[in-house]
Image: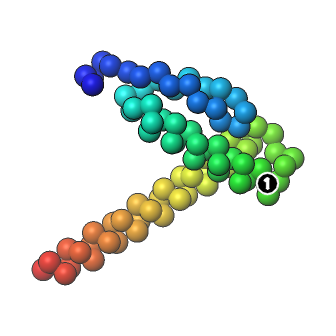
Amino acid sequence: MTQNDKTRTTVEIHNKSYTIVGHENAHHVRLVASLVDQKMNEIEKMDNTLGTTRLAVLTAINTMNDYLKLKEDYAALLGSMKKKED
């Protein structure tokens, strides 16, 4: 796939269809959409009075929190591996 090639993948998140355009393959886009949908459903189960906007923001916050924790864990693991090499 060249720099200018983009794929269009239609996914469903929280009962709405979205067409995602980007450089990732369709399988990857569907996986990401599925994980977002799962996280939104998980949060909605805790509070089903949330509107879609609040639910989306809380999903983004939770996802970014998980990402930052993984990034910190990865950095710590790399540091640990580097110490063992020295």
Does 17 sit above or below residue 75?
above
Residue 79 or 21: which is nearer the viewer?
Answer: 21
Residue 43, image x, y percentages: 73, 53
Q: Which residue ends up furthest to the front in the rendered image? A: 27
Q: Is any part of residue 57 visible from this angle?
A: no
The residue furthest top is: 4
Quadrant hosting residue 42: bottom right
At 27% across and 25% down in the image, what residue appears?
1
Q: Is residue 67 above or below residue 23?
A: below
Q: Is residue 86 left or right of residue 80?
A: left
Q: Quadrant of residue 79?
A: bottom left
Tell me if mark 1 has few (under 14), some (14-19) or many (20+) residues whose alpha carbon lies within 10 angstroms of its own: few
Total residue callouts: 1
Q: Is residue 42 above or below residue 31?
A: below
- Mark 1 highlights which residue? 45
69 relative to 78 in the view: left or right = right
Image quarter where the C terminus lies is: bottom left
Which residue appears at 45% of the width and 31% of the height? 26
Residue 67 visible somewhere in the drawing: yes
**Extreme left residue here?**
86
Residue appearing at x 41%, y 65% in the figure? 72
| Disc 1 element | helix
* In the displayed structure image, the side of residue 48 where residue 16 appears, left or right: left
Amino acid under disc 1: Lys
Residue 13's x, y, as percent?
A: 65, 36
Q: Is residue 64 left or right of residue 79?
A: right
Query: Percent from the top left, x then y, of residue 30?
Result: 52, 36
